[in-house]
Each structure stands twice: as structure tokens, then as C-alpha cells.
Image (cartoon, coloured by chain):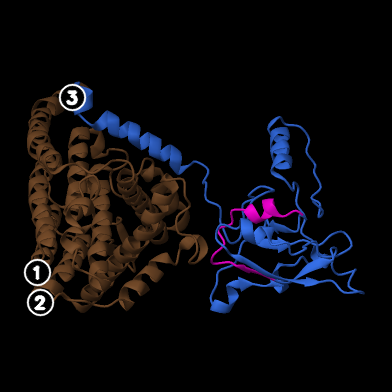
Amino acid sequence: MTLAERAYLPAIATGLAITIKHFFAKKVTIQYPEVKRYLGPVFRGRHILKRDADGRERCTACGLCAVACPAEAISMVAAERVKGEENLYREEKYAAVYEVNMLRCIFCGLCEEACPKQAVYLRHDEFVPVFTERDQVIWGKDLLVEDMNNRYTREAWTKEEAHLLDAKRANGEATNVVPRAIP
Amino acid sequence: MDLVEFLVKTVTIVAVFGLTLVIAMYSTWAERKVAGFIQDRSGPNRAGWGGLLQPLADAGKMFFKEDFIPALANKWLFIAGPSLAMLTALLASAVIPFGSTFRIAGHEVPLQGVESNIGILYVFGVVALGVYGIMVGGWASNNKFSLLGAIRAASQNISYEVAMGLSLIAILMMSSSLSLGEIVAQQHGMNWNIFYQPLGFIIFITCSFAECNRVPFDLPECETELVGGYHTEYGSMKLGFYLFAEYINMFISSAIISVLYFGGYNYPGMDFVYEQLVKSLGTEVGHNIATLIGTAVFFGKALFFVFFYMWVRWTIPRFRYDQLMNLGWKKLIPLAIINILITGAAVLFLKPAITAWLN
């Protein structure tokens, strides 16, 4: 070692210079409960059962989501649509009960991919909140089905769309995509 | 000693202790804030504005934890450990000159707990006692790791006290006084000791890091080797006292550094400011305000060094034990002795030569 290295002090001064630079640097912290980070248009948060533009439930209770689910979190009971319910359910068969066990769910999004009717989605903007009671764990249709007065909108409904959007933004192109409710 | 003088002294001492405790309290907050800032985080910011109530929350937590004493520990010494640490840490603050004097109704009241003509010697004595708090606590815990930490603290403090004392002798040779008040008064204006004793300052600050058991010399509580070091068995407010004593020590040593090397309450242009204040506000009020400005300057310097302690803590990794001992015995002590020789030669030959040349 040279004398300067053995004297420690030059190295310590360099180190102090580095840390003081960080002292005045912009903080990376996001003040979470007040400020929420945008996680992208296809982030996988809590589930939603979509309705179509007329407000009819899209789900036809085929059970493909339950089959695809690796955590076996989804269960449903199918029922046949009767006359006069055409404004409620889009298909002739619908899910009378649709339950997701939020403790089992791993938010992989395979249900979303399996769904042939584009009925089930994982919201990009909301998480499953913290449970404090055991009856809050299994979410039924009351929590899952979309509210027509407050429709769930997003900028991209598929991964491909989202990638396209990202690429456009990376190129600096104008991307004023209006979030839309229908996939 | 008449009653008035006694009361004045009591008030000053209580004020000095209170001030030291408040500063130590907010040092814990500042430490976490500085740690956060240096690591690109924002530090505590939930309790109160900017996290300013965090020390109170911490103290509240400490008080409400179980006050546990291990079954095989020596009960009295176990309690005496943190008490001693607190006591010795606070004692040193009594002789620090926080400012010049206050004039109240024709009386001159020095802003110093005790004006002692052996101030610096007293500080050294008390600081040397400080290791008892750690040693007693570590031994009384009846735990191998505590004892190892305590022994490390003792050997480290003894090793570095030698170099610290030697680096100080150079200052004393220049000031030819042991009184802290006198040493500060000699550094009037910008005539600070740092310009005459840069080497001594580096030795002194290194040793004060070691004396305070701060990073990079925090081997007594080195958690990777010794669990928690001397306070492994401590919890609740007893642990709080140990940690608190460390912050008090930090403030005290920062204050001592600014007194010895950075002119305490002196600042460039102080005579001009004093004259202006006395001219416009009268001898009493003007003098008091000038003193207050000096005190603010003093606290600015002391708090900068507290910040420096934290800054270093989040920069330098911990020394290994043999490196620590090598640095202390083989580098700092010879350097301090060389410093004494140089200072002696300068006082003996250079100073008369310069004085003769100037005249």
C-alpha cells in the first residue's frame, strides 16, 4: 500500500464525499398510504367480474378459470338463465355463486387468460385489503361483480396492448390513451 | 458562597443538563434522519411534523417494555451499569463554556456550569470513568458476550485515551492553561486552534470516535460478533439509558472538539458585532445579545460535529479488533508524540522568531 492508502484519510474523505452526495440526492421513497405508485395497466391486483356495455354479466360459469387456477381458489355454482333475465346475464348459463378465496389466490392471472368470455380480470388499481376477520377472506359476487355506476377502466386490456403502449412511450410518442371499460 | 450565587449556579447547571438531554434526545431523531437521507430514504416522518415526536415515541416504547433482570445477574451492578453510564455522560457537560457571560443587574453570569481552572482535566477524568458504566453492566449481566463487549470497550477506551491525552498536551502547551474558559478565550475571533494543530485535531477526533464507541470503532456492541455487546442482556429503559448515554457522549465530545479546536463561541468579526450591539442597545442588552449570538455559533459548531459523527457512521465500515489496536498504539500514539515535539519546537523557536520578525 502507498502512504496515502495507509493513512486512511484520503479514502475516508472520498467515502464521505459519496455519502454526502446521497444526503442531498432526491429520495426514492414513495409515501405509500398517501401516494400510490402507478403499477402499469396490466398489474394483477384484486379480481373483478366484468359486465358488458349493457350491464349484463359476461360470466357463463364454464369453470375454465377454476380449472386453470393453480391454487384452486375459485369455486362457482352455475345456473340457467330464465326468461326475463336477459338484461342481467349475457349468456344462457350464468354463475349463481362465484367465490374467490383470497388467501389461496396467488394473483397469477391464469384465470384471466383462461376466460373465454373476458369476464374475469385482475384489477390494476386496487389490491385485496388486509383481512381482520375470517369471513372477509372468501369474496362472493357482491364484492366481485363490476359496479356499472363506477366502471373499471384501464388503458390496456391485454399484455400486447400494454407492451405497445410502453414501446410508444419509450419512443416519446404522444400517448393520450383514454382508459376504457370494455376489453 | 452566598445564596444568590448558589441559586444562579443551580439554574445554570439545571439548564445545561436540560439542554444536553434535549440535544441528546433529538440526536436520536437526527441519527435516524441522517441515516435515511444518506441511504436515499426519508427517515422517520410519521410521528409529528418530520418525525419530530419520534424520540418521545421511542422513549414511551422503552418505558413500557418489560424491565427484565436475568436470574443469574448481579442485580445491583446490573442496575448500576446504565446509571453510571448516564451519570458520567452528563457530568462532563458541567464544565463546557457554552458562551461568554450574561450581564444581569450588574452581575456577570458565565454561561458555564462550573468555571474550573482544571476543566479539561475534569472532562478527562469523567470520560475515563465512563467506561465503568459499560464494564460494570457487561460484567453484571453474567453473559459471555456482554463480558467480551465490556472488555473490548475497556481496552479500547484505555488505548485511545492515551493518544487523546497526548494530542491534547499540544493544545495545553500552546494555551498554558487547563481551564476550558481560558482556552476558548484565547481563540478570540478567528484565532482557532485548528489552524495550529491540524494533526492534533485529527488524532483527537479519531480518539473521540473510539471513546464514544461510535462507528468505525463500535466494537463493544459489534452485533455480528457479540450479539449486542455489553448491552445484550439489557432491555426496557436500562437499554435506553445506555443508548442515550452514547448520544450524550457524542454531544459532549462534539462540544469539547469545538471548544478546543474550533474556538467555541468565537467567530470572525465578533468584535465588530459586539461594538455595534453595545453602541445601539446599551452595555447590558447589547452584551447579552452578543453572548447569545456566540452561544448560537457554539451550538452550530457542536451540532455540526454531531452530524459529522453520524455522517461517518453511515460511511465507514467497522474496524477489525487488531486494526483498532494497531491504529491506536502504533499510529496515533507515535503521531501524537511527534505532534507534541513539533508543537514544543514551534513554541520555543518559531513563535519568538515570528514575533521578532513582526516587530
Q: Marks 1 and 3: which is nearer the front?
A: 1
- Residue B226, given in percent of the width and then of the height, sits at 17, 55
Q: Residues within 10 Å of mark 2 (few under 14, many from 20)?
A: few
Labels 1 and 3 share a subunit = yes
Residue holding disc 1: B140
Image hue for chain B? brown
Q: Amino acid at mark 1?
A: Ala
Q: Earlier in the sequence, mark 3 or mark 2?
A: 2
Q: Amino acid at mark 3?
A: Ile
- Residue B124, given in percent of the width and then of the height, sits at 12, 54
The magenta stretch is: A98-116
Chain name for mark 1: B
Chain name for mark 2: B
Q: Amino acid at mark 2?
A: Trp
Q: Secondary structure at mark 1?
A: helix
Residue holding disc 3: B354
**Residues at circles 2 and 1 in contact by the CB criterion of under 8 Å:** yes
